[in-house]
Image (cartoon, rainbow, N blue to C red):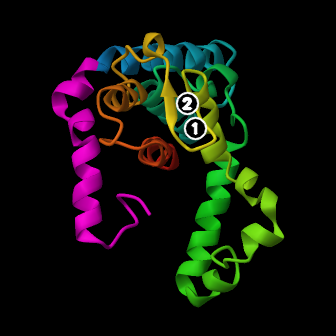
Amino acid sequence: MNLFSTRNDQYHRDQKKLVANSYSLTSLLDMEFAVDSCTKLLIQRLDEYATQSKPVDLGEWMQYYAFDVVGEFSFAKKLGFLEQGGDVDGMMAGIAGILEYAAKIGQIPFMHKILLGNPLMPILFPSMESWNQVLNFTLKAINTRCTIQRDGELQVRKDQVLGKDMLSKWASATIGDPDKIGTRDIIVHLVLPLHLP
């Protein structure tokens, strides 16, 4: 359950309170430099195509750009889409698969309880969690600056959470008040924007 999928008004209010300040106009303007750096890299990469008179799929490049901007906002680093000029760690393919599944299951919702929503699936296929490229990518990005303990708690290295990005803000909040925002909440709120591009 997350801010977009919940139908529970109280849960939505509680979760929105945790993250709303990070999406304020002031916070977003503080990150403008990150968008500018992605824009500069995009123009540079498109210029390479122009100088070689090669055709370019602008839709794909806009998606690469969006992922890298989200990476800057979420983790204070580009995710590598613009640099590689392609899908990184199969994230775009993974999202396409999720959307295809959702489109079909949206037409016949009771099938979800038989398929991926079946409580036996994690037991029958314990490696199922590794199928979610977006979650795995997010966990990898989090683990470059924090450590998720076996008990699910986020161990924060203070020297690694000094930025203006979302991970820094939310991880810093756990230092002052561990009950304010939990590890699961941080992961969910960092995964969500990666589904949008």
The three-letter amino acid code for the residue at tag 1 is Thr
The x and y percentages for residue 63 are 53, 39
Other-residue count near label 1 (Cα within 10 Å), few / some / many at <14 / 14–19 / ≥20: some
Give percent across and percent down for residue 17. Answer: 22, 48
Judging by the rendered image, the residue that carries numbered circle 2 is: 142
Q: Regarding mark 1 in the picture, which secondary structure is present there?
A: helix
Q: Is residue 74 magenta?
A: no
Which quarter of the figure has residue 21?
top left
The question of residue 3 being in magenta is answered with yes
Among the 4 quarters of the image, the one containing residue 27: top left
Q: Residue at x 40, y 66 (%)?
A: 5
Q: Which mark is residue 138?
A: 1
- Looking at the image, residue 175 sits to the left or right of residue 150; the answer is left
Provide residue 135's location: percent of width, then percent of height. 61, 46
Q: Report crowding for label 2: few under 14, some 14 to 19, many 20 or more residues within 10 A (C-alpha).
A: many
Between label 1 and label 2, give the one nearer the viewer.
Answer: 2
Q: Is residue 23 visible?
A: yes
Check contact, mark 1 vs mark 2: CB within 8 A. Answer: yes
- The quadrant holding residue 166 is top left
Q: Secondary structure beneath disc 2?
A: helix
Q: Is residue 57 visible?
A: no
Check residue 170 in the rendering and tell me which mark sits there, or answer none: none
Left/right of residue 49 with respect to residue 163 in the rendered view: right
Lateral position of residue 3 relative to residue 115, left or right = left
Q: Which residues are magenta?
A: 1-30
* x and y percentages locating residue 1 in the rendered image: 44, 63
Magenta region's main secondary structure? helix
Query: In the image shown, does 17 or 68 lie closer to the viewer?
Result: 17
Which residue sits at x=63%, y=76%? Answer: 117
Q: CA distance from mark 1 to mark 2?
A: 6 Å
- Of residues 52 and 117, the one drawn nearer to the viewer in this rendering: 117
